[in-house]
Every structure is written in C-alpha cells, then in structure tokens.
Amino acid sequence: MKILLTLPGPDLASTDFLRSGTVVHVPAADSAPDDALLAALLRHGARALITTRRPADTLLCAWAEHTAGPVHVAYVPSDVDPTSADPASQAPTRRPIHPAYPVHEFTLDGTGLDAIAGALARCERAAALARPVPAGTAPEAGGPREAFVIGAGVVGLVTALHLADHGYRVTVVDRSPAPGTADWRAYGCTHGGDDARMFTLTEMDIYGNQDFRGEAPEWFRQPVEKHGWLALDPATLTPREQDWIEEFESVPSWLARGYNADVFSLTAEAGQEWTALRARFPRLFEDVALAEDILRVYADPDHFRASLERHHALGAVLRRLSAAELAREYPALAAPARSGTLVGGILVPGFTVNVHRFAERAIELLTGLGARFHWDTPVTGVRRGADGAVTGFDCAIPVPAHAHVVASPGVDGAALLHGTPCEGRIHGVIGGWARVENRAPALRTSLKVARRGHVTEDANVTVARDGDGREILIVGSGYGYTGAAGEPEERQLAALRAGIADTVERLFGESDEPDASSRPSDNYGFKYCVRPWTATSLGLYHAEPLGPGGALYVVTGGHNTGGFAQAPVTARAVLASLRGDPHPMHTLYHPERYPSFATGA
C-alpha cells in the first residue's frame, strides 16, 4: 500500500517512516494545484493521502476512478489549528464521492509526528478492514451444522466449546496422545508447557520497534546467552528463517503502534468474552486455581513509570503501589521490595488458571455436549485441486462431508498451512518453566515481573496447585527463536534456565523446589514449550471456501504469548465466519495484511 504524505511538518528523515518506501514524502504537493496533486498520487500509485487540506471532490473522484478501488485521505480540519499538538477529536467525514469506489476520510490531530503516525495507521487499518474475506453459510440458511476441529490446545478447545454451544456437531482431532498420558515433549504448548496461563489486557503484544527515531531490535540475531532471543546456531538459519527475521525488523514504528492498538482492542473484546464464558460455563473455572487480578512488579523506575502511563491509557490500572506498599501488603514480596530489587507495582485486571485442569474441564464439557475426541490422530496434509481449492484432508479419521474444518495448528502444523497465505509465517519461540513452593507467607496474587535488560525480561509467576492440591508457584519466562522447525541449542536453553533461576532466587530466595507430586507431569526441574509466533507479532486468521455447500476451511494461530488470552475472541471470530458474519479479526489478522502493505499493493 503506497501512502503519499504531503505535510511539510517535522523532520521525517530522522524517523523510520520513509525507510520502507511505502510512505512517499512530497511536501511540494501540499500546496500544489489539484491537477498536480492528482498527478503525484497517480505517479506513486498511492492509495492513501495525508495532507494539510481536504482535496476537492473532483480530485478524490478522479483518484478513486484511476485507482479502481477504495482510497483513503487524512487532512487537518479547517477549524483546527494545524500546529496544535492535541486538538479536539474530529469525527471522520464520509460522503458518496464515487459511485463505485469508496473514499474513506479521516481528520488529522495536528501535524506532529504522533498525528502523522496515527493518520498513517488509520489509513493502513482502513485498507485492511476493507479487504474482502470468504464467508460461510449459517445452518438456518442451509449451511453445514458440523465442525471438524484440528488441534486440542486451548484455542482449539475454546473454539470447539463455542461452536458446540451454538448447535454445531463437533469432532476434535489432535496429533498428540491424550493429555497427561505421555512425556511433556509429546505435546504442544497447552499440554506440554506448564499448568499455568494468564489473562491481562496487555498479554499479547507487538514486539517490534515502536520508537519513531529508534532502530529495530536485533533480538532474533543475538543468542539468548547475550540477552537476545536466538536459540539456534546462526549458521544454521535457513533463507526462509532469515527472511522471517528481516520481516520482523522491517515493520515501521508507526505501523507497530497501530498493530499494537489492534491487538489490544481484540484482547479487550476477549476480556468481555471471558466474562461471558465464565457465566455460561461456571464448571470450566471450578478447581482450576483461579486467581483474580494480576500484580505487575518492576525492577527499574523508568520502566515502572512508562508502564504505569501505558496502563492508565488503557484504563487498566486498579491500583499503583510503591515499594513500601508492596512490602506491607504482599508479605511474600517484602524482602525484594525492601532490598530495592522491586521498586513498585501496578495491580491490573486479569486472572490466572491451572491450564491443564482448565483443558480437562473443557474436554468434559465438550464430551457432555456430544463432541467426539480422537487423540494420536494427526492431519498430515491438505489436498488441493488444480485450481488450488481444498478437496480433502489426509487424516485417519474421515472428515465429515460438508463439515467446516477449523485448524489451530500451533508450531507443528506446517502441513495444514500449505497452499494458504499463512504458509511459512508461523515460527517457534520457546518459553521456559520452573516451579517453586509457595511457602509462608504465601503469595495470593499472580505476578508479572518486569526486569528490563534481563535474559528473562518478563516473567509470569502463577499462583497454582499441583496434582495433589499443594500450593506452588509456576514461573514462566524467556524467549528463544527456534525457527520453522528447529531444536534449541543446549547452551541457549541453559541461559534461559539460568535466567529463570535468577528471577526465582531474587524474588523467592527462601523457597525450594516443590515436593514430588503424584501427577507425573508435575515433576520436572525445567522444561519449555514452543510458542507459535509471526514476524509481525499479529495473530493469523485465514478462511477459504471448502466445497460448494457453504463450508469453510479456517486457520487460526500465531498468537505469540496471547493464545490463551485471546482464545474466546478467536472462537467468536470463527463462529462469525461460519455463520457468514463479519468480525474485525478476519481482516486485522489476515495473513496478507503486512505483505500487501510492504509491497505497495
């Protein structure tokens, strides 16, 4: 998507706004006659314009006609001072300018960098939302009443539960053994990682550069032992993995900020869906060590202040706590708060659960709703005809005729992505796990620990119970890129393990490893799971027609650290697709969103 920027404004050369070539700065066109401005738009193939004044309808109509598609324009309203840094918010103007091609109009909040970044993001988002997506046919209109769900991780289970609750006959298959019957290495994230998951409004994030004058972080080029995120030998990276890393580094700061807003909006919707799910299925949250609210704690004063500002902007601050208040009100943290290890905290909305027990409850509920489960049943391929259309699936369990197929493949489902625009976009990033006893004075609130510049910069500490009901703390943290199908280097795993151990020592130095549990999966010193990531940090959502009867093949995934957090909004988006209804996730997480922007399409 090409964007023409004519504002003479600030020093754009010191930012990353123009580096990709998709944003073209032509300040001379800002005061040029309409014919010259139109010529510049057409010369650069622009589909969006950011300018000081609103162009005439005749120019906008001619531009849309030449573009043969929707165009987007942002400008400073005539009653707003263009030098103002924070004018009153202006509602978008929408008028029928072209009979066939829409012209989307937005108003600029001034002419500073923040205003320009916001306008760029709004133009890109409007183009993304306008993308047409396939829609299924609702059962009452003759569409399928059956859904075949591939992947019994938490996203697949919550999706299956949502579909079953809305009258679909559900079959669930998974490549792994039944949960709890094999070594943790046989499973994906949900059943192979530890028994802890967290929801907060910022649980899924954008990890690229969001500093206008900053550089892209080189996390994927530095090994874990040097505070990077690379868990592989750099010499073994394939060309496709190199391309993935380069794509991560290529996302401009303004777009990363826009993506972050989109992710947070979907997580906010997920929060509402979690509330609805708890009301609809209270059994799902029984005996899962549910702990309400999350205490974010910080080791760096600047990081604490910045995070407080960020959470205030989201309306996600229940309370701010000083180090002294932490020590007084959370006795389990008294030692690190008094020693200066922790400088303060923020209590935010959220919750944690034992995710293995949560999954058990979901399977019980689904079985009660008539769902059928098949374990050790991989789907090894997607068959396609000469025209690229899906004709079938390679699976030991036949896919019912005329059923929707919904795949949540995690990292190990590359075969399910073949022939879709999701192909090659999901790579692995490991996170490590360790356990410690929750000794007196016991911690009652789960934590998110921020240690800027540390190997395990962000750590979740979950208040949990083991298989015998004993109170424990589960610590999950770390990032280690394993590429498309790689195994982490032992040295990098050791660095991750040491980082988690250091966090445990600093916060809970008096605690020991828990006693052995009667549940075998509880007993380990250190383990890891491989999380499905995308280079853009956006999740993926893909739908395509499956046969002539209104069925769809839907792929969801790539949620990095937010699969659990966004599970119910993903389920809502899937249901919307199957019924032929719109949902923002269909376009905001479309796998071609960034490629179409980056190539100027």
Image: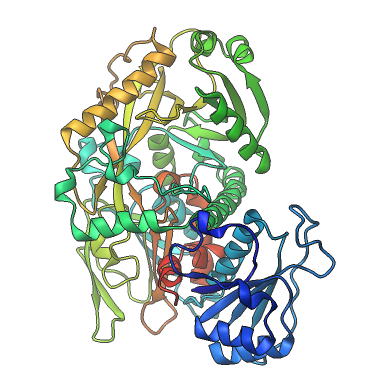
The correct choice, above or below, for 582 with respect to 490 in the image is below
Residue displayed at 35% across by 59% down? 247
Residue displayed at 66% across by 58% down? 115
Residue displayed at 47% across by 77% down? 134
Residue displayed at 57% across by 66% down? 125
The correct choice, above or below, for 270 with respect to 287 in the image is below
- Asked if residue 179 shows in the view, the reply is no
* Figure colour scheme: rainbow
Looking at the picture, how far across and down is residue 474, in whole percent? 39, 25
Looking at the picture, how far across and down is residue 88, in whole percent? 81, 57
Task: Give the residue furthest to the front.
Answer: 28
In the rendered structure, the answer to whether residue 107 lies left or right of residue 171 reads right
The correct choice, above or below, for 251 with respect to 272 in the image is below
Q: Quadrant of residue 160?
A: bottom left
- Asked if residue 234 shows in the view, the reply is yes
Work out whether residue 105 or residue 188 is closer to the camera in this orientation and state it: 105
